[in-house]
């Protein structure tokens, strides 16, 4: 009931203007998240972009770090 | 049933216990339980997991619950007896798989995921955009309708297609195929004014769980 609290516990703070959607996968559908492309990656190849993606980003509890912020590259 | 497994909205369960890189199986026995469950192909495990008494359920790890449920399922299906489980020895006259499972067959069983969507044409009761409410039903056996949706009003976001109603799978009555709908609830509808007015929850609901709002 408190997804923002959970995300905060996992290290992700979201401002009030961001909409949070919780997906309860109780039936036959399963979900993965297409992470938001971080800033400063416009010139990166698909292969290089893939190295930035983390497990946590694909389940929606973390954002993908931009390379200039020290993300894996 | 209104059991402990139906935790949506509960508080006081402690920290999530985040692990940066968690192994798929913490111990080899967990992998064996997973493989056994897949090899037996006995159908849905959830009804058996949900029958674990609440204090035990909360104490057990994920694969401890799988193991407990699997043993119950094997006994109730007549594959093994309680005596065989306790002694760890097969009774000389017990059922045997013929032919015995080979490693190659086991590998194929491990990756088999039964397709659940039904190839049946049924007129849907609801359409995208309809306002619906979770019905005040309290099934005594397995259901996929969490308590937090009871009496709550949402909007049909998508028609998922036709699936067998899980509540009907365990009963001796005929399995019931019906439409499943993705329902959009606002966070405040579910959790009150404590939550953000921006947030939402999406959940799949079988047709029997819903009534027009």
Image (spheres, coloured by chain):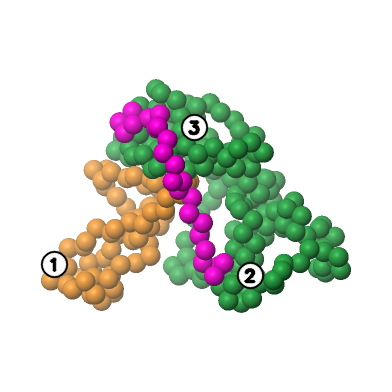
- Tell me the distance, in whole angstroms, between the alpha carbons under discs 1 and 2: 45 Å
Residue drawn at point x = 54 percent, y = 70 percent: B108
Q: Vertically, is A55 above or below A33?
A: below
Q: Residues within 10 Å of mark 1 (few under 14, many from 20)?
A: few
Q: Main secondary structure of the magenta part?
A: loop
Residue drawn at point x = 49 percent, y = 32 percent: B209
Quadrant for residue B179, please give it: top left
- Tell me the distance, in whole angstroms, between the alpha carbons under discs 1 and 3: 46 Å
Q: Disc 1 designates what residue?
A: A42
Q: Nearer the viewer, mark 1 or mark 3?
A: 3
Disc 1, SS: loop
Q: The disc numbered 1 marks a residue on which chain?
A: A
Q: Which callout, 2 or 3, points at the residue further toward the start of the chain?
A: 2
Q: Disc 2 designates what residue?
A: B32
User: Which color is chain A depicted in?
Assistant: orange
Q: Residues within 10 Å of mark 3 (few under 14, many from 20)?
A: many
Q: Vertically, is A25 above or below A49?
A: above
Quadrant for residue A67, please give it: bottom left
Image: magenta residue range: B108-130
Q: The disc numbered 3 marks a residue on which chain?
A: B
Counting from the top left corner in percent of width and height, residue B2 is at 61, 36
Nearer the observer, A42 or B18: A42
Disc 2, SS: helix
Q: Disc 3 designates what residue?
A: B209
Residue drawn at point x = 28 percent, y = 43 percent: A19
């Amino acid at each position: 009931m408190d997804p923002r609290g959970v995300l905060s516990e996992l290290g992700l703070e979201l401002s009030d203007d961001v909409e949070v959607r919780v997906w309860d996968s109780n039936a036959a559908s399963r979900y993965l998240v297409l992470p938001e492309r971080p800033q400063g990656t416009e010139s990166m190849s698909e292969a290089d972009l893939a190295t930035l993606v983390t497990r946590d980003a694909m389940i929606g509890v973390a954002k993908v770090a931009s390379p200039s912020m020290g993300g894996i590259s | 049933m209104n059991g402990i497994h139906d935790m949506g909205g509960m508080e006081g369960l402690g920290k999530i216990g985040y692990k940066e890189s968690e192994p798929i199986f913490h111990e080899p026995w967990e992998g064996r339980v997973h493989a056994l469950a897949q090899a037996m192909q006995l159908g849905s495990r959830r009804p058996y997991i949900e029958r674990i008494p609440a204090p035990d359920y909360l104490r057990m790890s994920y694969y401890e619950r799988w193991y407990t449920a699997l043993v119950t399922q094997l006994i109730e299906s007549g594959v093994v007896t309680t005596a065989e489980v306790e002694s760890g020895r097969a009774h000389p006259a017990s059922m045997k798989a013929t032919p015995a499972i080979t490693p190659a067959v086991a590998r194929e069983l491990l990756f088999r995921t039964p397709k659940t969507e039904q190839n049946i044409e049924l007129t849907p009761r609801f359409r995208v955009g309809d306002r619906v409410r979770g019905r005040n039903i309290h099934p005594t056996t397995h259901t996929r309708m969490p308590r937090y949706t009871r009496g709550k009003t949402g909007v049909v976001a998508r028609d998922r297609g036709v699936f067998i109603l899980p509540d009907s799978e365990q009963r001796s009555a005929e399995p019931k195929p019906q439409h499943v709908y993705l329902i959009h609830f606002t966070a405040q509808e579910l959790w009150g004014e404590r939550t953000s007015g921006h947030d939402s929850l999406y959940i799949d609901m079988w047709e029997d769980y819903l009534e027009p709002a």
